[in-house]
Image (tube, rainbow, N blue to C red):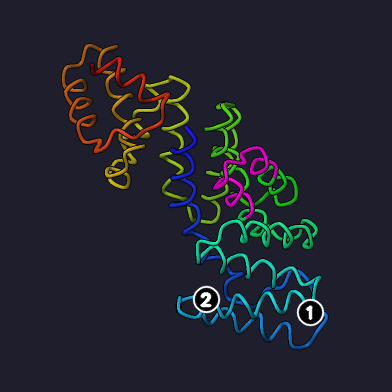
């Protein structure tokens, strides 16, 4: 199941970061001690769309951090640029320092750190960061969403659904409901083996995730279970067609075993 959730997190949740107001370069969660530090920090944002400068900007930010060691924002953006360069261990270290220095004042630091933990399979550490987001930023939906996401691996599906519901409510308030909330509902209900509840969510997610093997595996399973339970030949046929679309059959073991028993 790890592969399924990690793909979901890395490809979906991460893409929302660039929309955060933090990336306008005007927010500082820690006060720089040197006058030049903030100027260098703000300069870094100009390079976000120019990969050829990532290395140089990373070195600049790390230099700022070494000279201004309590400036958490420099560490965070260094981590961000390191992640963009696939230097994930280094990014994790920088994010960890940034979050520690920010003293629970920066939700985006915790979110990025949690996702980086997930990249290395550190699910418990990621859950802790999401729980801290809920504690310190109760009106931020990302903490609740993250708990829902980690529940896929941890297995506390009811806890995941409870938090996902709260995330959905908060996304609606902001007018920015994430597309993957629907998919996550379908995923969690499928894992709970509540297939009839899961199926409408998975159907609603089809247009967005129809090329994703993880999604197709869950959708095929829900279809075949509901189809057989209702003796609905159309659903059973649709399940078979969906199953046949899974290209390489590299899917979560738990789901693969269930699909094999249904379609063998």
**Could you tell me residue 26's position as x and y percent?**
65, 78
Front residue of 100/235: it is 100
Q: Earlier in the sequence, mark 2 or mark 1?
A: 2
Q: Is residue 71 magenta?
A: no
| Horizontal arrangement in the rendering, residue 186 relative to residue 106 (left or right) | left
- The answer to which image quadrant residue 232 occupies is top left
State the image coordinates of residue 6 (x, y, percent, origin top left): 48, 43
Q: Is residue 167 above or below residue 11?
A: above
Question: In the rendering, which numbered label is found on residue 54?
Answer: 2
Give the quarter of the image for residue 23: bottom right
**Tags 2 and 1 in contact by the CB under 8 Å rule?**
no
Within 10 Å of the Cα at label 1, are there few (<14), some (14-19), or many (20+) other Cα atoms? few
Secondary structure beneath dot 2 equals helix
Estimate the x, y position of residue 97 in percent, counting from the top left: 74, 60
CA gap, disc 2 and disc 1: 20 Å
Element class at badge 1: helix
Residues in magenta, as a range = 113-128
Q: Which residue is mark 1?
A: 67
**Residue in the picture at 66% in, 37% down:** 124
With respect to residue 209, does 174 lie above or below? below
Any magenta on residue 119?
A: yes
Taking the image as shown, residue 228 lies to the left or right of residue 129, namely left
Using residue 159 as the reference point, say whether residue 251 is left or right of it.
left
């Amino acid at each position: 199941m790890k592969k399924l959730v990690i793909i979901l997190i890395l490809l979906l949740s991460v893409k929302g970061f660039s929309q955060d107001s933090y990336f306008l370069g005007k927010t500082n969660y820690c006060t720089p001690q040197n006058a030049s530090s903030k100027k260098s920090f703000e300069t870094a944002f100009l390079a976000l769309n120019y990969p050829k400068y990532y290395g140089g900007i990373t070195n600049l930010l790390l230099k700022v951090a070494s000279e201004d060691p309590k400036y958490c924002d420099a560490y965070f953006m260094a981590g961000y640029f390191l992640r963009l360069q696939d230097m994930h261990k280094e990014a994790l270290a920088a994010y960890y320092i940034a979050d520690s220095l920010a003293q629970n004042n920066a939700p985006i630091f915790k979110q990025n750190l949690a996702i980086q933990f997930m990249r290395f399979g550190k699910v418990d550490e990621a859950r802790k960061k999401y729980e801290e987001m809920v504690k310190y930023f109760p009106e931020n939906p990302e903490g609740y969403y993250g708990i829902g996401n980690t529940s896929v691996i941890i297995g506390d599906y009811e806890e995941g659904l409870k938090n996902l519901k709260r995330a959905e409510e908060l996304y609606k308030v902001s007018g920015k409901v994430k597309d993957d909330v629907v998919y996550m509902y379908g995923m969690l209900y499928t894992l709970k083996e509540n297939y009839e509840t899961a199926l409408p969510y998975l159907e609603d997610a089809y247009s967005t995730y129809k090329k994703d093997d993880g999604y197709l595996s869950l959708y095929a399973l829900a279809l075949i279970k509901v189809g057989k339970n209702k003796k609905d030949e159309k659903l059973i046929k649709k399940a078979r067609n969906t199953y046949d679309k899974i290209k390489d059959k590299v899917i979560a073991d738990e789901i693969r075993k269930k699909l094999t028993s249904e379609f063998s």
